[in-house]
Amino acid sequence: MGISKQSIDDLRNRSKISDFILSSTTGKLRGNKGMALCPFHGEKTASMSFTDEDNLFHCFGCKEGGDIYKYIQLINNVEFQESVEIAAEKYGFNLAYTDSKFESDQKNLIGSMSKIHNFFINNMKEGKSSQSIDYLKSRDLDGTDIKEFRIGFAERDEKSTNEFFKKNNLTKTDLKSLGLLSERGNFLFKNRIIFPITNLRNETVGFGGRALDDFGPKYINTAESSIYRKNRSLYFTSEFLSDLKKKKFVILVEGYFDVIAFNKLGFNNVASPSGTALTVQQINLLSRYTKEIYLCFDNDEAGDTATKKVLEIKNNQPSEINFFKLNLPKEFKDISELYEGGISDINKIINEKEDLAEFCINKIIDTDNTKKTFQEFKQISSFLSPLEKDLAIGYLSKKIGITKEVLINELNYQSDNEPLSQNENSSRQIKHIETFQDILIAEIIKQDFDIEEEIDLLINLNLEFKTLIDELKANKNGNEFEKYENISYSDTQLKESVARLYIYYSDIKIENLIKEMDESNDLTLLEDLEDLKKKIEFYQNTL
């Protein structure tokens, strides 16, 4: 069942996008408009505008934008209908439902995936591969575990698999829609142990397969589909959500066996991104249920690098989320190896969790080269908020025996003496100009291209900008046109944009006029130069 358009529109009019933005990132609301740090890309200066008047948001940095439902979709890793239901729940709004083809298609895909999963489970239950059972035993998993964690097996011989597909009317088109075919149109899973990847309703949406052969990739996942998106999905077991709500923290690990090992040790609140590539979307999903995330990637250099990488994206998340590192004994590569080694009590490891920033600092400390330590600390501190940075400086001070004041002075000195390169200055200026352009274009569209004289003069200063405006006017239904309709801004921001653009394009025009005068000796151009200089002076005084 879908939601009626009338309900969607009525709820949009009743809701406020600021309620969702200000609860998921740092920002300020003035009247019915505001600016916030964009949670969808890394930044330290607010570049995402939003307005309660139109319930729209737009980021001038990554260009992400849309209405209140789009924001809820992105921040919570949900589809459109669930975003509407989340908003309705917040405001106590009763939704009216209707039939939906999309909803029906999604249910059919999930139903087909469930049938295929049961087929894999039966393969394992019927003992079609003693090799797979022997391998699982070597990982300290018995028949009860195989049943509990719904582990299956995909045969090497495709004959019975193809017969199953034929019997259940599953065509190659269906399998492609489910993400189960390779680019060449072959079935992905052969002679592999199968782990089910589910959504939070415990519906199977994809598979992870562990190879039993020595060639080819050890692990492969279902390809992207409308029900499975790798950057938004996690592997966990059936009790994950209930245990997460009870324990109030989540543990993130690298692989399928790591998740199962933690389950066997009494922790079902564990998930894996199927590797080390943890994404913003996966963290956003988890942030709906907990503000405590414990990282327990592999106990090796790659695992440490992945852990440190989280520090770079942590400030793209709601500010109240806390990240910690679980440190395993050095002799164990990962939690599954620890479990298979016979250790059953890991409460000490949980209780001795380490703050993520402190873990990263400990990894860079070089007692023989304080300068190198400090240089690497500068990079780490660039990912921290002001408070986190101050605490990190205090921690480093104690670890290396240098006063906090000296470290702060050194940090400030290094920053003051590292000017931006010409390319960096140029790219930043261009980025700002693009932002001012976006605001002005949004205003021009809002006025339905009824352009006043001042703005018309500005547009005609730059041929490229004028061409862009003309193309938008001629193609009002295009994708480019649509993105500007989502931009919100204040009157102050609009005035600044006009001034900055006038100065920027006038400077370029002056350079071109000077070159033209040199080549033609046309002194009549001096009058145009003086007019432009007066305009620049006027707009500089407005800033």
Image (cartoon, rainbow, N blue to C red):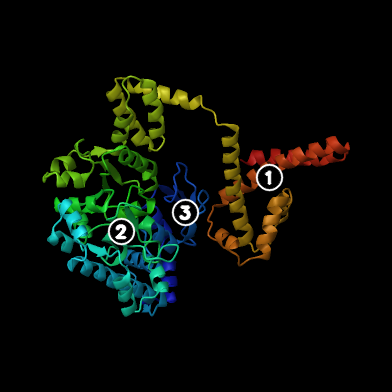
* Observer able to see residue 396: yes
Residue visible at 36% across and 67% down? 82
Amino acid type, label 3:
Gly
Residue at the disc numbered 3: 31
Residue at the disc numbered 1: 502
Residue toward you, 306 or 483: 306
Report the Cα–Cα distance between label 3 and label 1.
28 Å
Amino acid type, label 1:
Tyr
Residue visible at 42% across and 59% down? 71
Labels 2 and 1: the sequence-earlier one: 2
* Quadrant (top left, top right, bottom left, bottom right) of the C terminus: top right
Q: Is residue 452 above or below residue 387?
A: below
Front: mark 3 or 2: 2
Q: Where does the image place residue 236, in percent across and percent down from the top left?
A: 25, 57
Q: Where does the image place residue 341, in percent across and percent down from the top left?
A: 14, 44
In the picture, measured across the screen, residue 89 lies left or right of residue 38, that is left
Q: Where does the image place residue 494, in percent across and percent down from the top left?
A: 59, 50
Front: mark 3 or 1: 1
Whether residues under marks 3 and 2 lie with C-beta atoms below 8 angstroms apart, the answer is no
Report the Cα–Cα distance between label 3 and label 2.
49 Å
Residue at the disc numbered 2: 208
For the image, the number of numbered tags is 3
Q: Is residue 21 above or below residue 368?
A: below
Which circle marks residue 458 in the picture? none
Circle 1 residues within 10 Å: few <14, some 14–19, many ≥20: many
Residue visible at 30% across and 51% down? 214
Amino acid type, label 2:
Gly
Whether residues under marks 3 and 1 lie with C-beta atoms below 8 angstroms apart, the answer is no
Report the Cα–Cα distance between label 2 and label 1.
56 Å
Residue toward you, 193 or 286: 193
